[in-house]
Amino acid sequence: MHILVTGGTGYIGSHTCVELLASGYRVTVIDNLSNSKQEALHRVSEITGCELDFVRTDLRDRAVLEALFRDRDFDAVVHFAGLKAVGESTQIPLEYYENNIGGTLTLCKAMTEARVKKIVFSSSATVYGDPASVPIREDFPICPTNPYGRSKRFIEEILQDLYRSDGAWNIVLLRYFNPVGAHRSGRIGEDPDGIPNNLLPFIAQVAIGKLPRLRVFGDDYATPDGTGVRDYIHVTDLARGHLKALEKLATDPGVVTYNLGTGRGYSVLEMVRAFEQTSGRSIPFEIVGRRLGDIAICYADPTLARTELDWTTDFGIEEMIRDTWRWQSRNPEGYE
Ligand code: NAD
Ligand code: UDP
């Protein structure tokens, strides 16, 4: 099986390439390197002992994509490529819509022409917006609150329309909760550009001394300790979910949607304490006001992925933090 991985040099993509190669898949990655480094793929090969092909291109370059699909015999596509910063998406919404939706349209047209009609798409729990209750099931209302989330929602709908127009398509929509951690080798991990937006990379940079202190965004939420609760999931568990999704595609399921989360939430302060324990470093923090657009609590009901994909998580919070810390302490400058 030959898989095209869009955005495969990125954080989740590179970890998924490791799992694909280790399971015997052939892999071709395309990426424009707008938010990643090619070095990640050298390390993927080093970890797995397997080679993979890399084509540097923007997903929206139709001529390159068509040539790629003409020249190679892809069986399916795992589609990660996209812009992902919620805050930035409120500043430059058109870039987000153009990149995320435009890229997906070009990809799907090239796939149609080549008659490759199997795709796994990276959606996000952010499509649920502020849920009325937790845990969140796949049939909960979809109401994203920012342009990034809306780009995911629109792509989900575009893919559903595509299936309605042509039943030969098979599509798995994966709604990720909060991916964290790194490969256990410490060789690949999340390498954010500039100051991290997400909690765990921020804490890791405080632990290593690159940032002075964590700002905890609000301690007055209706949660046990007042700080926000999220469903953190180890990136290797998430990556393995994509292999299960590819197996599902082989059964011609039509369009199916799955939450990928652990089903357990942790607060910001629980994460701080767990990180201090694992790293042996202290994490200074101050409580500041709420971050605009944040919700109190978000965690998955992962039952559907368990029953229909036979997917469960292997790693808990200790491994998530241990592997984040190993990656951060061994690669203080990321891939540089
Ligand atoms: P990432 O930024 O590390 O990886 C995305 C990759 O896509 C990058 O390597 C980037 O260079 C590439 N890319 C972006 N636009 C492109 C284009 N037009 N053409 C070619 N390449 C392009 O992000 P990630 O954390 O690995 O996320 C992967 C996917 O999962 C994204 O679609 C993201 O929205 C989604 N997702 C991520 C999270 C998260 O918290 N990390 C949560 C939910 C969903
Ligand atoms: N958070 C925080 N300080 C930070 C970054 C995040 O207190 O510097 C909190 C945030 O308010 C949320 C949780 O940590 O409650 C997870 O935030 P993240 O941005 O990682 O994920 P998301 O909010 O997108 O689920």
Image: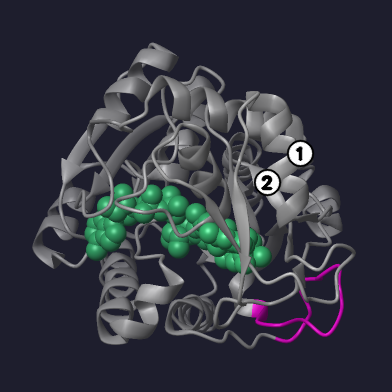
Q: Residues within 10 Å of mark 2 (few under 14, many from 20)?
A: many
- The amino acid at mark 2 is Ile
**Highlighted magenta segment, given as a residue range:** 128-141
Q: Is residue 180 above or below residue 140?
A: above
Residue topped by disc 1: 313
- Whether residue 146 sits left or right of residue 70 in the image: it is right
Location of the N terminus (image quadrant): top left
Q: Is residue 130 magenta?
A: yes
Asked if one can make out residue 196 in the rendered structure from this viewpoint, the answer is: yes
Tell which circle, 2 or 1, labels the residue nearer the N-terminal end. 2
Residue shown at the point (67%, 36%) measured from the top left: 275
- The amino acid at mark 1 is Thr
Q: Position of residue 143 (x, y in %)?
A: 63, 88
Q: Nearer the viewer, residue 149 or 311?
A: 149
Residue 38: image quadrant is top left
Residue topped by disc 2: 233
**Which of the four quarters of the rendered structure image does ligand 1 lie in?**
bottom left
Q: Position of residue 45 (x, y in %)?
A: 34, 19
Q: Position of residue 162 (x, y in %)?
A: 46, 79
Cβ atoms under marks 2 and 1 closer than 8 Å: yes
Q: Is mark 2 within 8 Å of ligand 1?
A: no
Q: Nearer the viewer, residue 84 or 211?
A: 211
Outermost residue to the right? 224
